[in-house]
Image: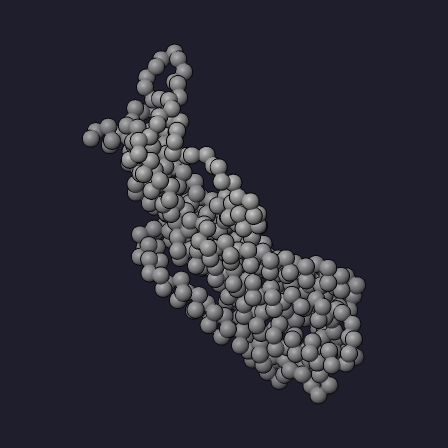
Amino acid sequence: MSEDGNCSRLELESCATTAENNAYLYVYSPVCLLGIIFNVLNLIILCRRSLKLHPSTCSLLVGLAWFDLLCLVLAAPLGFVRCLPYAYTWEKMLRNVYETYIFLPLVNTLATGSVWLTVVISVERFLFVKHWLLARRLCAPNSTPKIILAITLISALGINMPYFFYQTLDENGNIVKTDFGEGFGFYCYMWIRLTFVKFLPIILATAFNILLLVTVRSVQAQVGQMVVMATRQSVAMTTRRSIDDQGRRHGQQLRLVSLVVAISVVFVLCNVLEPFTHSRIYAGMFGECSLNSEAYRILRVVSNILEMFSFAINFVLFCMFSRQFRLACSRLLCCCIQENRVDHFGAVAVPDFSEKPNAERPVQIMEYSESHKAQLSRISEHDAESCSVGDTLATLELPSKKLGT
């Protein structure tokens, strides 16, 4: 508290500067509204099972979309609540009720759930890549994702419960801190919450995604080496097609891993500033009256915008890294769907691996029989993206083994 005693009072004022007003009204709220639309599209496409994902991965992504959607819905009015002038005197009471009992506790609860679920998805992908047998046993039951989502929601609500008692309204409808909010107990709680909601998830997400990239790179090198060996040696055509199919499945798995890594990277970058916007931390670093400075207000609104951006951007990441998602989205948004499509099983170009020195190896056009078509149809309908990299290595055999049979 400064000598004039106005620091605490000024901290509660909203949109005190033009920059803060413009940021909330013309950046924060539009990001929330756009994110609501994006997450609704995410839910529709994921719930229709348009993407060939492992059931556990799909359920976790649906849960993440729900957390993000509800968080954006509750956070969207913040810019209008803080920055628009009062038309009636009773509006002040309603706006302060929203900030005290809706925005602060509930939005933080949903944001915490989204943060933890992002880490869970990274861990799940790492297990499928590195320890795929263990991951299959853990994720095989349909109840596993539901249990994870329930634990995440209950834990997020529990760790943010003190926010319901942090502030209250006085007889004039103004927001004031409670004795608990002013006490040392809340200061200790704030550091515990920051540890489990911000610091630890950021560290875990970074660590698991680095391990995920290293593991995928190692497996990709092994798969590439096997494909090269199969190309150089005269292997059976069925073995060659099996290796090519596994290579395509590995490519789809790699795109799924890239999607998970991109989601985690956006989460880390957009949440790294948020811990420093807490009033106790900022005041401890720069003094109590620094909470009224324009620098602190800009930092706070930028942090809020980045956090909402991380909840809204997943739709764009899905479109960037998943061709199936783009196709499903185009079918959803466009009424016209092409009926005449290329028959992928009518004629397939396969290289001729017979030895023909001093001449280019021609490409043979081989018509598949009905049994071959049925077999390829079952392969194409297989859940390619749910197959782990461990499946790829387990089903690939060295060409030398095939030649020896």
Q: How is the rendered protein coloured?
A: one colour
In the current view of this chain or complex, which residue is farthest to the left? 405
Looking at the image, residue 222 lies above or below residue 1: above
Q: Quadrant of the N terminus?
A: bottom right
Residue in the image at 40% along x and 38% along y = 248
Q: Residue at x 55, y 78 (%)?
A: 162
Q: Quadrant of residue 245?
A: top left
Q: Is residue 29 left or right of residue 350?
A: right
Is 9 on the left-hand or right-hand side of 191? Answer: right
Instruction: Give the residue drawn at x 58%, y 79%.
Output: 164
Image point (69%, 78%), residue name: 94
Up/down of 63 relative to 175, above or below: above
Residue 356 image offset from top left, x and y in percent: 34, 14
Query: Which is more toward the observer, 379 or 183?
Result: 379
- Quarter of the image with the C terminus in it: top left
- In the rendered image, residue 287, in percent from the top left (x then y), is placed at 70, 71
Q: Position of residue 152 (x, y in %)?
A: 46, 67
Count of number-bearing discs? 0
Displayed quadrant of residue 190: bottom right
Is 282 situated above or below 326?
below
Residue 207 shows in the view: no
Q: Taking the image as drawn, is residue 64 in sight? A: yes
Please name whichever residue, 178 or 55, is drawn nearer the observer in this view of the structure: 55
In the picture as drawn, the residue positioned furthest to the top comes out as: 358
**Rendered view: 16 above or below 352:** below
Q: Position of residue 284 (x, y in %)?
A: 65, 70
Choose between 48 and 62: the one closer to the eye. 48
